[in-house]
Structure formats: C-alpha cells, structure tokens
Image (spheres, helix red, strand yellow):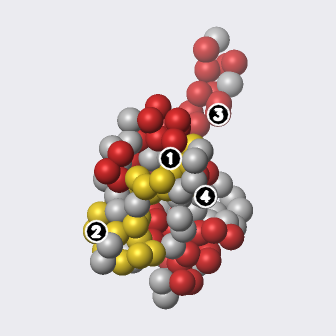
C-alpha cells in the first residue's frame, strides 16, 4: 500500500505554513524557502507560479507529490493528520483534498491491498489456514506437548 499522502500533497498546496523564525533556523530550513510574515514569524514561500502551493512541494498534486525538505518540515506540517490514519477524520486533510477535487480519505484507504483481496474473495482466507495453524501450534499443544 502506497501511503496516501504520496499520491496527494493537497494540504501543501492549500495552507500557508507559518512558524517562528527561530524554529525555521533551528530546523535548518533554507532561508530562500521562507519569507518574513511579521517581526516574529516567517512562512514557507509560495510557488510564484501557483500562490496556493508551498515552494518545497515537488510533483503533481493528486498524483505523486512529496516534500523536498521532509526531515526539516515545520511543526504545522507535522501536525496535519491524514484522515483515518490514526482512526479519525481530519478536517484539514478533508478540506484540502476537496479543494483539489480529490475524494476524502476513508478507513478503507488504510487497508493493505492483500487484506482487501481477502475481503473480496473470502475463500482466499482459507488458503492461509496452514500458516495460521503453524503459528498457533504451541498454544494447541499446551503443557502436555512439553511433558
Ligand atoms: S491532504 Fe491529507 S492525504 Fe493529502 S497530503 Fe495532506 S494529509 Fe496527506
Ligand atoms: S514544508 Fe513540506 S510538508 Fe510543509 S507545506 Fe511545504 S511541502 Fe508541505
């Protein structure tokens, strides 16, 4: 399963990311990627060709997108949750995806493809039976198995 964010990037092309200049400095963010917002804060610079898009976003929104400074990304970026990744919807994620014409994520977006195949074809689950029995063997034997 590819992480849904790697096929998205909508939040990075929707919200202005602001932080204290000291945070940007501590994270080592290239000053060319930020601009002064007020005496205390900077924001991630917007792509001059697309004012709603963070300049650090690479790729195409909704197809394949990633943050070019991912290890250094600011705090607000780290706080955006992808809907249902942690068992709950995320308003920021949903609004960004809707703005870019993408469907909101659902719990099904986090189910591995192999599990979906089992759900679609329940008989496939039976073919996994030997592996399950092998895994549970010590439990079945109980104390007698060691006696
Ligand atoms: S909008 Fe949601 S799915 Fe898209 S990149 Fe942001 S958190 Fe991930
Ligand atoms: S810094 Fe990275 S994670 Fe944050 S908005 Fe820009 S592209 Fe997205």
| Viewer-proximal residue among 103 and 135 | 103
Q: Give SS at disc 3.
A: helix
Q: CA distance from mark 3 to mark 2?
A: 52 Å
Say if disc 2 is inside 8 Å of ligand 2. Answer: no
Indicate the secondary structure of the residue bearing disc 2.
strand
Residue beneath disc 3: 140
First reached walking from the N terminus: tag 1 or tag 2: 2
Q: Secondary structure at mark 1?
A: loop
Residue 74, numbered circle = 1
User: Comparing marks 4 and 1, which lies closer to the viewer?
Assistant: 1
Between disc 3 and disc 4, whose residue precedes? Answer: 4
3 or 4: mark nearer the eye: 4
Q: Position of residue 91 (x, y in %)?
A: 68, 70
Spot occupied by residue 122 in the image (x, y as percentages of width and height)? 53, 72
Q: Are marks 1 and 3 in contact (CB under 8 Å)?
A: no
Give coordinates of residue 96: x percent, y percent. 55, 75
Q: Out of 86 and 114, give the one closest to the viewer.
A: 86
Residue 66 falls left or right of residue 81: left
As measured in the structure, the alpha-carbon distance from the residue carrying label 1 to the one carrying label 2 is 19 Å
Question: For this view, does 68 lie left or right of residue 36?
Answer: left
**Which residue appears at 69% of the width and 18% of the height?**
143
Nearest to N terminus: mark 1 or mark 3? 1
Asked whether mark 4 lies closer than 8 Å to ligand 1, one says yes
Distance Cα–Cα, label 3 vs label 4 = 42 Å
| x then y, percent, for residue 94 | 61, 75
Q: Earlier in the sequence, mark 4 or mark 1?
A: 1
């Amino acid at each position: 399963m590819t992480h849904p964010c790697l096929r998205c990037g909508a939040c990075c092309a929707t919200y202005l990311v602001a932080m204290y200049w000291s945070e940007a400095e501590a994270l080592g963010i290239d000053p060319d990627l930020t601009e002064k917002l007020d005496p205390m804060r900077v924001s991630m610079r917007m792509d001059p060709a697309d004012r709603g898009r963070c300049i650090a976003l690479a790729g195409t929104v909704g197809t394949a997108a990633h943050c070019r400074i991912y290890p250094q990304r600011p705090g607000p970026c780290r706080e955006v949750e992808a809907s249902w990744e942690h068992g709950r919807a995320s308003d920021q994620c949903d609004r960004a995806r809707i703005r870019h014409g993408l469907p909101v994520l659902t719990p099904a977006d986090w189910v591995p493809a192999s599990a979906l195949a089992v759900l679609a074809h329940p008989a496939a689950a039976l073919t996994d039976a030997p592996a399950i029995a092998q895994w549970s063997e010590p439990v079945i034997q109980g104390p007698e198995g060691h006696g």
